Image: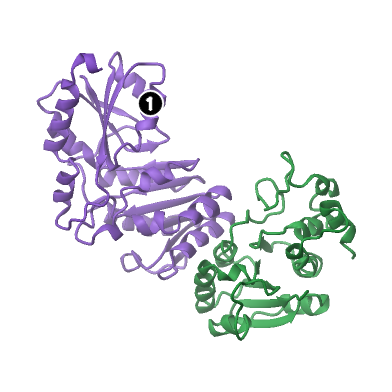
Chain colours: A green, B purple
Amino acid sequence: MNLTPLLDRLDGDEKHDWSALSTLDVLWVLYDRVLQDGDRFMLSKGHGPQAYYAVLAAKGVIPESWLDSWGDYDSPLGHHPDRILLPAGGISSGSLGHGLPIAVGTALTGYRTFVLVGDGELDEGSNWEAVQFAGRRRLGTLTAIVVDNASASYGWPDGIARRFDLEGWDAVTVDGRDRDALAEAMSRNHVGGPVAVIAEVRR
Amino acid sequence: MSMRSRFYTLAAQALEDDERVWVVLADIGAGELPRHPRLVNVGIREQLMIGVAAGLGLAGKRPIVHSYAPFLVERPWEQIKLDLGHNDVGAILVSNGASYDASRAGRTHQAPEDVALLATLPGWRIEVPGHPDELERAFLRAVPGDDRVYIRTTLEENQAPVGGDGLVKLRDGAPLVVAVGPTLAPTLEATAELDAGVAYLTTVRPFPRRELREALGDGDEVVLVEPYLSGTSAAEVSRALVDRPHRLLALGIEHPELRKYGDPSEHRAAHGLDARGIRARIERFVATPTEVR
């Protein structure tokens, strides 16, 4: 599936936002091959939601025509998503570090819950409250996907996966452009605890 | 039994009675409640505490969240604003500590600003009971709903509960003194020998604007006695009486940075919320020369 024409409707054909493109393959694979009926998905990294909107349009969740007017006064599509305006069952996001704790709450009730965060977003300490708790609670219904495009100001020396691993998560690092590898990692069987998929995307 | 103890009893019962109910704690209160599959203690992680509550709410559950007021309302403030408010998710937040219950613990455990803060966000029902029975009434009303409710417990309480919802007129007279929650006991003592009317209020948001107009009758003087930051409901009174010339005296916590320890009763006196302080200020207010009015 080539999503470029849909992205073009959002941004015109040349100035695609790097933070939006970094999540494109992850989101497509999630919606195309991973999410099942009853699963919950939360886009915590609300910055650069063009890929999210393009995937939702490609999957028929929202009309393609919405893409043409995103960010306009009456548009349901903002530069950060608002779950009340956007009928996609997720969360409102934009302020970083909120999605992972919310996902923990939903996962506790038994829903298979997927949350997408960015490597820069992980700077926010609120994420680590959730990572620590979910790991120790062995929260097997939770999958966190970290799109790592090396945007954190101080980086993550020795890698992001190691930090999840230490807190009791099953963490795996994959090429964030390799759709087969992403599908396999995000569909991993939970062995009694939460799964973290670090999707590396480099320019 | 204090309001706080009553809350623990009610929360344990709600976990048994209602499968929608979950209780979310950040260590505080964890030793007071029996273990239960739907009781989640996240450890000392207040941002997570509110985030988890929002996630539970999104899954159709009824989260009850509890901690000391500063750690429940102030530390995770953005989570309250966004995870609950902006996502339009319901939750019941029940605090203890109030303005100066933790007088010896110091400023870190005191939140006289809690009601003023939550009143800036749309959609919150704010309950300030003055007696354990009133706490129970507020709690049992909140549990079946889907809205956002804040219930503020205090150590101080009135001798008896007051029946009735909304603004309850207890005595006619002028000025009209509106006592909120646990300030009723000192307010009744302060006004015993005055001509003042007294009304009682526990649900402070939404503020009962119409009922205030009715209770005031032809009067034009209102005294608010609130157990949190002074002036918290002053703008509500102003809106209720927008078309009527009136005077307002708003009493409450006057010195959030008091920097004193001691007993709660000493703090109450320092803020002028004991019977003596309330009476003195009502008398000064009433005695204000007519030409100044």
Crowdedness of circle 1 by 10 Å Cα count: few (<14), some, many (20+)? some
Above or below, comparing residue A94 to residue A140 in the picture:
above
Q: Residue at x 73, y 46 (%)?
A: A71
Q: How many marks?
A: 1
Quarter-of-image position of residue A36: bottom right
Q: Residue at x 65, y 63 (%)?
A: A45
Q: Quadrant of the C terminus of chain B?
A: top left
User: Label 1, on which residue?
Assistant: B238
Spot occupied by residue A164 in the image (x, y as percentages of width and height): 58, 80
Above or below, comparing residue B255 to residue A30 in the picture:
above
**B155 left or right, relative to A161:** left
Who is closer to the viewer here, B12 or A87? Answer: A87
The answer to whether residue A114 is visible is no
The answer to whether residue B274 is visible is yes
Spot occupied by residue A62 in the image (x, y as percentages of width and height): 79, 50
Spot occupied by residue B132 in the image (x, y as percentages of width and height): 26, 47
Who is closer to the viewer here, A90 or A92? Answer: A92
Spot occupied by residue B222 in the image (x, y as percentages of width and height): 27, 25
Above or below, comparing residue B163 to residue B128 in the picture:
above
Amino acid type at image mark 1: Ser
Above or below, comparing residue B157 to residue B21 in the picture:
above
SS of the residue at dot 1? Answer: helix
Who is closer to the viewer here, B19 or A117? Answer: A117
Q: Residue at x 77, y 57 (%)?
A: A50
Q: Quadrant of the N terminus of chain B?
A: bottom left
To which chain does the residue with label 1 belong?
B
